[in-house]
Image (spheres, rainbow, N blue to C red):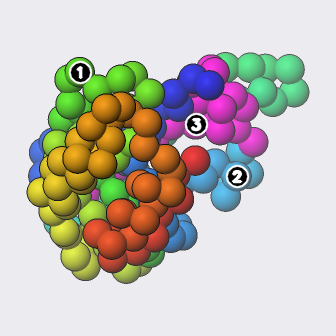
Amino acid sequence: MTFQTPDTVIYKRKKYLLAAANGSGLFDPADYGIKAKMLSTACWRGYQCTYTIRKSLLHLATATIGIDNEGITGELCMADMRDSIKFTGGMLLANDFISGYPRMMSAAIYGYTTVHELLFENGRVTACIDHSMAMEEFRRWIAQQHADEPWQITRTDVQEWMEQVFSRKYRQS
């Protein structure tokens, strides 16, 4: 399966991959009566967003949406949006992918050196937890547990370890 194009978040002037989110209120074109159509094999859900955090508030900066309306197909690009997003829940942000990791690992949160967990209430950041050191510890754990084949860890291995680290549960698709 093709790696799916992730949403991104601009946080403290740095661009992060939105690796996982748990909660409600993120942008969805269906909430506006827009039926998204697959943009490419790398974007099955049909849209990709960039969020920004300004003055502790979450905003939708851009959204690219695949459309197919009455025979008219293409992309709808919305930019420079200033509305705040009333998201309540948690996000995992990742940056600085580790060179040398197998390509399939680009979807795994522990394949990044910088990992932040942001918690929100009605679009306002209520907490930020830096999990970068925890990811480093996990990579060391992988090396110890699976020294002969470090990339052969199971989903259960990752899930059990991550439940110990994060304050909320995340399901990645």
Name the residue type under label 1: Gly
Q: Is residue 3 left or right of residue 46?
A: left
User: How far is mark 1 from mark 2, CA to CA?
Assistant: 38 Å
Q: Nearer the viewer, mark 3 or mark 1?
A: 1
Where is mark 1, residue-wise? Answer: 100
Within 10 Å of disc 3 (Cα), the crowding (few <14, some 14-19, many 20+) is many
Residue located at (34% from left, 57% from top): 92
Is 36 placed left or right of 101 in the picture? right
Nearer-the-camera pick, 14 or 97? 97
Q: Residue at 23% x, 52% y: name it.
A: 141
Q: Main secondary structure of the magenta part?
A: loop
Q: Nearer the viewer, residue 165 or 119?
A: 165
Give amino acid for label 2.
Ala
- The answer to which of marks 1 and 2 sits earlier in the sequence is 2
Tell me which segment is drawn in magenta: 35-54
- Split into 4 quadrants, where in the image is the N terminus? top right
Q: How far across and down, in percent of the image, does residue 121 sit?
A: 37, 79
Residue under the point 49% across and 47% down: 154
Taking the spot 78% from the left edge, 20% from the top edge, the residue there is 72
Q: Which residue is mark 2?
A: 30
* Separation of residues labelled 3 and 1 (CA atoms): 29 Å
Q: Position of residue 82 (x, y in %)?
A: 35, 53
Q: Reply yes or no: does residue 36 show up in magenta.
A: yes
Name the kind of residue labelled 3 in the image. Tyr
Magenta span has 102?
Answer: no
